[in-house]
Amino acid sequence: MKKALVRASVVSVFALVSLFAGSTALAQQAQPDLYVTVSYIKVLPGQDEAYRAYVTSTSKKVYQEMLGANNNLQFWSIARLMYNGPGEGNDYDYVAAAVFTGAPPEPGTNYDAVFQKTAGMTQADAQKKLATMRTIVGTEVLRNQARASTPGTIKEGDFRVVGRIRIKPGMGSEYYDAMKTMAQPMWQARIASGEVKGWSIWSRVFPAGAGTTYDALNVMYYKDLASAIQGPDATRGLETFMKTHPGKNYATYINNLRDYSELQQRLVMQVIALVERPGR
């Protein structure tokens, strides 16, 4: 009888462990991937003022309404490029970005009801109107790999610094693992101290491959242009690392990043309109 009770207890313990493990797995699976669709926009001659007025009013209203029409939409913004060097492949003036949980909707998905309510016209007519002010010179899809941010802190007028990263051959797993396990906690600390407003790293899904110019985007938000130009305080790098990764070697971390990746280009832009799902 005692042996039977022991066996029953052991079975019960294993059942509880299995149940807990299953619940943990389900909780982990409940976090879908985040994707962002990015559009690069060139304004037609003489249309910059009209285009900016349209996107900061009508387009913003459309995406505010879109939050209710598409539960996967988390965040939308449009930003104007501040400095566009010649011959650097930056033949655009604005960058629009829409963040979704799970795969983004197919291009051309019908949102006529949303456009009729907010813009007073069909989706097709709205696109025709936009075509008189701008042209889209490129689009891409990226997947989030790591991020540190507080919902509601990114505001219109903030500055976004984007670093285009080329990952060295065979180093993708090492690079993104370092971003998740090492970089993310440090950026969380820097956000808490007020140095930056947000940070994220995104892997390029489409287009991708050897023929493209970069593999990942490193994105940081700042409260003003002076902060964006100065960047994070380099003198606090070691201090932040030691606080977030006690017992680990800072020099090894820096050398690893150099072995894994190479910065191709940095760009700064200012957010002129945004919509965000509350508590995302």
Image (cartoon, helix red, strand yellow):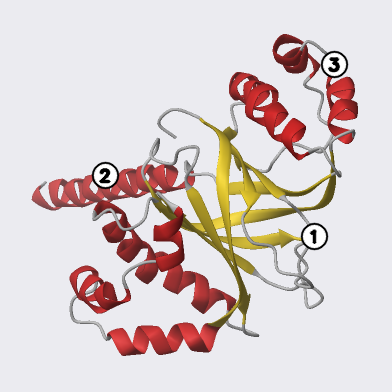
The disc, 1 or 3, on the residue closer to the chain's N-terminal end is 1
Image location of residue 107, percent across then percent down: 82, 38
The disc, 1 or 2, on the residue closer to the chain's N-terminal end is 2
Q: Secondary structure at mark 3?
A: loop
Q: Amino acid at mark 1?
A: Asp
Q: Which residue is mark 3?
A: 122
**Mark 1 against mark 2, which lies toward the viewer?**
1
Closer to the camera in the image, 263 or 44: 44
**Mark 3 against mark 2, which lies toward the viewer?**
3
Q: Secondary structure at mark 1?
A: loop
Res. 16 mark: 2
Q: Is residue 36 above or below residue 164?
A: above
Q: Is residue 243 visible?
A: yes
Q: Is residue 101 visible?
A: no
The residue lying at 76 percent from left, 40 percent from top is: 48
Q: How crowded is the residue under tag 1: few (<14 C-alpha within 10 Å), some, or many (20+)?
A: some
Image location of residue 142, percent across then percent down: 65, 55
Q: Secondary structure at mark 2?
A: helix
Q: Dividing the image into 4 quarters, which one contains the C terminus? A: top left
Closer to the camera in the image, 128 or 167: 128
Q: Quadrant of residue 50?
A: top right
Image location of residue 258, percent across then percent down: 49, 87
List the single residue furthest toward the front: 46
Q: Which residue is mark 1?
A: 91
Does residue 22 appear left or right of residue 77 in this picture?
A: left
Closer to the camera in the image, 155 or 186: 155
The disc, 3 or 2, on the residue closer to the chain's N-terminal end is 2
Give me the C-alpha separation between circle 3 and circle 2. Answer: 55 Å
Image location of residue 64, percent across then percent down: 59, 23
List the single residue furthest toward the left: 2
The residue lying at 18 percent from left, 76 percent from top is: 246
- Tag 1 near tag 2, CB within 8 Å: no
